[in-house]
Structure formats: structure tokens, C-alpha cells
């Protein structure tokens, strides 16, 4: 974790969705020193440790799990951004709004890619 990191933002996206990249989760303002999130974070604007959740492409707050159509596997990208500030965004901010607010403030980042395929 970079020393200058104050908060973290997490975005989960499916770049293989039939309609284009689908946002499954937007989380931001998680304090940089928090080592993990608890299971089953509730779908509300405010999240554990003072973090906030944004609007996903299901038009809900919080995490929307994988739901690809039957067929080929989909990739799910979890991108974590270390930021040098707390973002002045309200709960419900979109991925686009988050991206704009993070410009010039990303001091580190990482990514985990997983795949999921629905049974036939």
C-alpha cells in the first residue's frame, strides 16, 4: 500500500456482458488501513468502515453477483484503487462519476480477474 494512500475504491465489472462492460459493484472511501471487508456487505449507501457504495448496472446500491447468460464463461474484474484523498461523493455515485473523481488521485492500483460460467 503506498504511504500516500488515504482511501480505497473497488470496482467489479464484467467486460464480457452482451451489452458491453457491466458494472457489478462500486465501493469507495474505504480507509486505506482496512485489511478486509466482512462477508455479505448489505446493499446500502453506507458500508462497513465508513465506506460508501455506488450504483451498479442493476440500478441497485451494493454488489450484484455474477449472472451471465448460459454459454461461454465471463470474466469478472475486481479493480482496487489506492487514492490520496477521501472522495467528496455521495452514496449512489456511478462508475463514471467515480472515475472522474479519481482522476489525478490514484497512487496505486491492483486487479484480480476471475471467471464464472452458468450451468447449461
Image: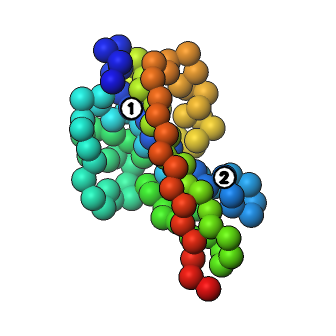
Determine the secondary structure under disc 2. Answer: loop
On screen, residue 103 versus residue 110, left or right, reads right
Dividing the picture into quarters, in which one does residue 120 lie?
bottom right
Residue 58 is tagged as none
For disc 2, the marked residue is 15
Residue 8 is tagged as 1
Give how far across and how far down residue 1 sits, in percent: 33, 24
Determine the secondary structure under disc 1. Answer: strand
Q: Are marks 2 and 1 in contact (CB under 8 Å)?
A: no
Q: Is residue 54 above or below residue 41?
A: above
Kindly tell me whether residue 46 is visible in this rendering.
yes
Cα separation between marks 2 and 1: 22 Å
Dividing the picture into quarters, in which one does residue 4 lie?
top left
On screen, residue 103 versus residue 54, left or right, reads right
Mark 1, Cα crowd under 10 Å, few <14 / some 14-19 / many 20+, is many
The residue that appears at 45% across and 57% down in the rendered structure is 63
On screen, residue 58 versus residue 50, left or right, reads right
- Between 64 and 77, the residue placed more toward the observer is 77
Give how far across and how far down residue 76 sits, in percent: 55, 55
Mark 2, Cα crowd under 10 Å, few <14 / some 14-19 / many 20+, is some
Give how far across and how far down residue 97 sits, in percent: 59, 35
- Between 107 and 89, the residue placed more toward the observer is 107
Is tag 2's residue or tag 1's residue first in the polypeptide sequence?
1
Name the colour scheme. rainbow
Give how far across and how far down residue 16 sits, in percent: 69, 58
The residue that appears at 69% across and 61% down in the rendered structure is 17
User: How many numbered tags mark residues here?
Assistant: 2
Q: Is residue 103 above or below residue 42?
A: above
Mark in front: 2 vs 1: 2
Dividing the picture into quarters, in which one does residue 40 lie?
bottom left
The residue that appears at 39% across and 49% down in the rendered structure is 45
Amino acid at each position: 500500500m503506498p504511504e500516500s494512500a488515504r482511501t480505497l475504491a473497488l470496482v467489479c465489472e464484467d467486460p464480457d456482458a452482451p451489452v458491453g462492460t457491466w458494472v457489478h459493484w462500486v465501493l469507495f472511501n474505504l480507509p486505506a488501513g482496512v485489511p478486509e471487508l466482512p462477508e455479505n456487505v448489505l446493499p446500502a449507501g453506507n458500508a462497513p468502515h465508513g465506506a460508501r457504495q455506488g450504483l451498479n448496472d442493476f440500478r441497485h446500491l451494493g454488489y450484484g453477483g455474477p449472472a451471465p447468460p448460459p454459454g461461454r464463461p465471463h470474466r469478472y474484474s475486481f479493480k482496487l484503487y489506492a487514492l490520496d484523498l477521501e472522495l467528496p461523493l455521495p452514496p449512489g455515485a456511478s462508475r463514471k462519476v467515480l472515475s472522474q473523481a479519481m482522476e489525478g488521485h490514484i497512487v496505486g492500483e491492483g486487479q484480480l480477474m476471475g471467471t464464472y460460467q452458468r450451468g447449461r
